[in-house]
Amino acid sequence: MSDNLVLEAKSVSKFFGTITALQNVDLHLNKGEVLGVVGDNGAGKSTLMKVLSGLYKPSEGSLFFDKEKVTLNSPRDSQNLGLEMVYQDLALAGNLPIGDNIFLGREPTRKVGPFNFLDHKKRKQLTEEHLAKLKINVKSADQKVEELSGGQRQAVAIARATAFNAKIVLMDEPTAALAVKEVGKVLDLILNLKKLGVSVIVISHRMDDIFTVCDRVMALFQGTNFAESELKNTSRDEVIGWIMGKKD
Amino acid sequence: MDHGEKRLMDKNQESLFVRLIPFFERYGILLLILIMIAVLHLLQPDVFLSWRNVTNIFKQVSWQSMLALGVFMVIVTAGIDLSVGSIIMLSLMGLAIASKAGMPWYVVMLVAPAIGFLCGMFNGIGITLLRMPHPFIMTLGTLYIFRGIGNLISGGVPITGFAEQIRVIGNGKIKLDVIFGEGAREYIPTSLILMIVIFFIFWIFLNHTRIGKWIYAIGGNPGAARAAGINVDRILIIVYTLCGFLAGIGGLILAGRTNSAYPNAGLQSELDAIAAVIIGGASFFGGRGTVLGVFAGVMIMGILRNGLNLMNVSVFWQQVLIGSIIILAVYIDVLRRQLATRT
């Protein structure tokens, strides 16, 4: 395996009582690589993402960040290791402006005497720089998120995930809730992240997404590794077959 | 003028109107206050804007504004605090008992805010740690509990007569001899200064600190706040504690004003506080509203009551009017939002 390995899961299993959500699943991700994860509902995709982000503890198996074995106790731990998750429900506060959402919980502050006050100027500047870097177009960094379209919100959620130099970004169905004309912009954004050297894992049902942005695709079926391939060595029909549990 | 031209004109006028919306959104409520002042001045030219009447309004709203400010923060988190009227009564009773027990005045003065602080913390802990399904239920319970305790410790009878130092906060006067000459009757009430200082501090707190930002974030989407690593329960406990603390300060002001602690103190004032917050433009669903709006809401209630009293309008009509204004204020908000979100 290459020296660029940033994330690896080795024979991860996750049990919920008598239910087996994941069974001996392996996953690896290289620097600047976009990995597509496909599978039917209940195949274990979301569970695997939650294990990688530290929301769930694996029942068995181990995780390696930059080839070092780690134990994640909460999403905070994975964030500290440079992994960010973009949630399917976006986890944005609509009443707050874009910049506030991007920096929520990690606001830049300045000290005045013994007190820490929000540094509104710096937040605005950092927001504008970051949006420009990701080529995200919005009217103003002060626009409230509830005034944005679904695609713009998705972009803000991704901007939020990458604002602190994330090395790995996990995205759960990033285009599922979007209008057709907005899907392209979000996919461009993913390719942009790749150019910036960020590794991305994308869960998607949409073959168009997978075949536009991914370098490699892996399929889960009933909680196990089912198939995996470089994108150039497979086809849409084959991948759709994997989702339904068919392999030649 | 043909139809095309007319349509164009309509469009221009409309866009001017649309452009004015943000202006009204921000300053409309201050405009409303100015109109109220102008009308009342025309109706009562000798009395309404007299120094005595204006200071009277401020003295009246000063303790109510403390409740409104606390309830405002709670409402921003999409919560509610029904117990503030009972907290003000309990803290007033506690103060009175400490005073009767002969404690030094500076200790007595601390008793009211301290009791308010503890009551608020009790609410906050109940809502978060006991996992009450809604703050309405917890604070409805403590509405009865706190007033009940207040009556238990006082025996249900009024306690009157406090030391002058204790009354300074609610009844003190800053003489303006320097401006108006020796022996002038014009003065600024201490409670007005206190109100301005406290509103300013909480404006800073809500707009320029991280916790303030998180309070708004929780009101907007508690899930987003949690995902951002914010300890939502901790912030909620802080908010309810501060709300109780402010009600305790309200109790201290009221002690100075009335020189008495009485069983009906603050009765139903939680509803006045909620009304002021809603009139001031805060959203009942959380995440929206400003400290300036709360101040305006409190002033509108105060000016309205004062004006109607000056004109000898019966209390019953005042109730009808205030109720109507709440509904009207929220309806205007509904219309505004329809305009803002149209496509």
Image: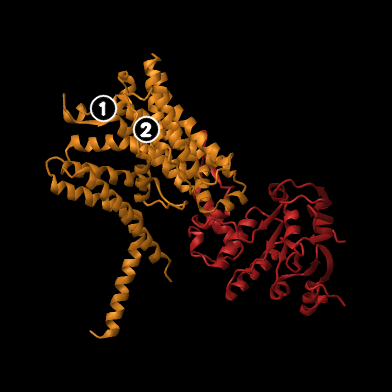
Chain colours: A red, B orange
Quadrant, the N terminus of chain A = bottom right
Q: Amino acid at mark 1?
A: Lys
Q: Nearer the viewer, residue B261 or A146?
A: B261
Q: Is residue B260 above or below residue A192?
A: above
Q: Amino acid at mark 2?
A: Gly
- Residue B252 placement (x, y as % from top left): 36, 28
- Residue B25 placement (x, y as % from top left): 35, 57
Name the residue at 53% across, 49% down. B218
Name the residue at 77% across, 70% down. A215
Q: Is residue A46 above or below residue B298?
A: below
Q: Is residue B15 above or below residue B198?
A: below
Asked whether the viewer can see residue B129, the reply is yes
Say yes or no: labels 1 and 2 on the same chain.
yes
Left-right relation of A172 to B328? right
Residue under pointer 2: B250
Question: Which mark's residue is nearer the viewer, 1 or 2?
Answer: 2
Residue under pointer 1: B173
Q: Chain of mark 2?
A: B
Upstream in sequence: badge 1 or badge 2 = 1
Q: Nearer the viewer, residue A226 or A161?
A: A226
Quadrant, the C terminus of chain A = bottom right
- Residue B192 placement (x, y as % from top left): 30, 34
- Residue B91 placement (x, y as % from top left): 41, 28
Disc 2 on helix, strand or loop? helix
Left-right relation of A197 to B306? right
Q: Chain of mark 1?
A: B
Name the residue at 30% across, 38% down. B61
